[in-house]
């Protein structure tokens, strides 16, 4: 496993994750407006900012884990050597996106008192976000050359 490349892919994935998130909130304010309908469920902006370092650290670990999974899939599939890293990253991003939508977004719809509209908006947003992160990881990560 190429640890420098892994670190760079994690950093790139982190930048892509937050850049997309900020862009989404700017371009689709309806997502924030929809969340504001549930003040008993979601923290205020001020309270979010107070715990933001925890969220950023958690996302760094999550993206590192996805980058490691990506690197491991390359190790286990040596025939991939000539393929596109971006395409492999997109495929992984799709799988992670489906996992997040099913294991997080829809699970929260069941457990939290939120509406279907917010759930669907989050599902699309998170799916696209992880697709982008996967593509960036695939673009940046380069395996160690095998002799």
Image (spheres, rainbow, N blue to C red):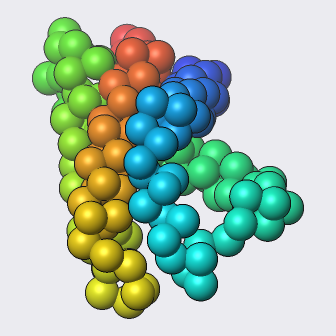
Query: Residue placed at 37% from the left, 70% from the top?
Result: 104
Left or right of 51 on screen, residue 59:
left
Residue 74 visible in this rendered orientation of the protein = no
Left or right of 109 on screen, residue 23:
right
* Above or below, comparing residue 143 to residue 73 in the picture: above
Displayed quadrant of residue 110 = bottom left
Quarter of the image that includes the C terminus: top left
Q: Position of residue 125 (x, y in %)?
A: 35, 46
Query: Residue placed at 79% from the left, 66% from the top?
Result: 47
Residue 94 visible in this rendered orientation of the protein = yes
In this orientation, which residue lies closer to the viewer: 55 or 4? 55
Query: Residue placed at 70% from the left, 50% from the top?
Result: 56
Residue positioned most to the right:
50
Query: Residue placed at 36% from the left, 30% from the top?
Result: 132
Q: Position of residue 41 (x, y in %)?
A: 55, 80
Q: Position of residue 6 (x, y in %)?
A: 55, 29
In this orientation, which residue lies closer to the viewer: 131 or 22? 22
In this orientation, which residue lies closer to the viewer: 6 or 13? 13
Residue positioned most to the left:
79
């Amino acid at each position: 496993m190429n640890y420098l490349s892994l670190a760079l892919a994690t950093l790139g994935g982190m930048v892509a994750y937050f850049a997309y998130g900020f862009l989404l909130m700017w371009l689709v304010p309806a997502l924030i407006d929809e969340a504001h309908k549930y003040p008993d469920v979601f923290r205020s902006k001020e309270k979010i900012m107070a715990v933001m370092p925890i969220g950023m650290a958690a996302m760094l670990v999550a993206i590192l884990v996805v980058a490691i999974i990506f690197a491991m899939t390359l190790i286990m599939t040596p025939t991939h050597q000539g393929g596109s890293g971006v395409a492999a990253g997109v495929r992984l991003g799709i799988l992670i996106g489906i996992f997040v939508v099913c294991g997080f977004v829809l699970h929260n719809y069941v457990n939290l008192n939120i509406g279907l509209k917010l759930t669907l908006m989050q599902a699309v947003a998170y799916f696209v976000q992880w697709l982008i992160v996967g593509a960036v990881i695939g673009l940046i990560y380069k395996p160690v050359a095998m002799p």
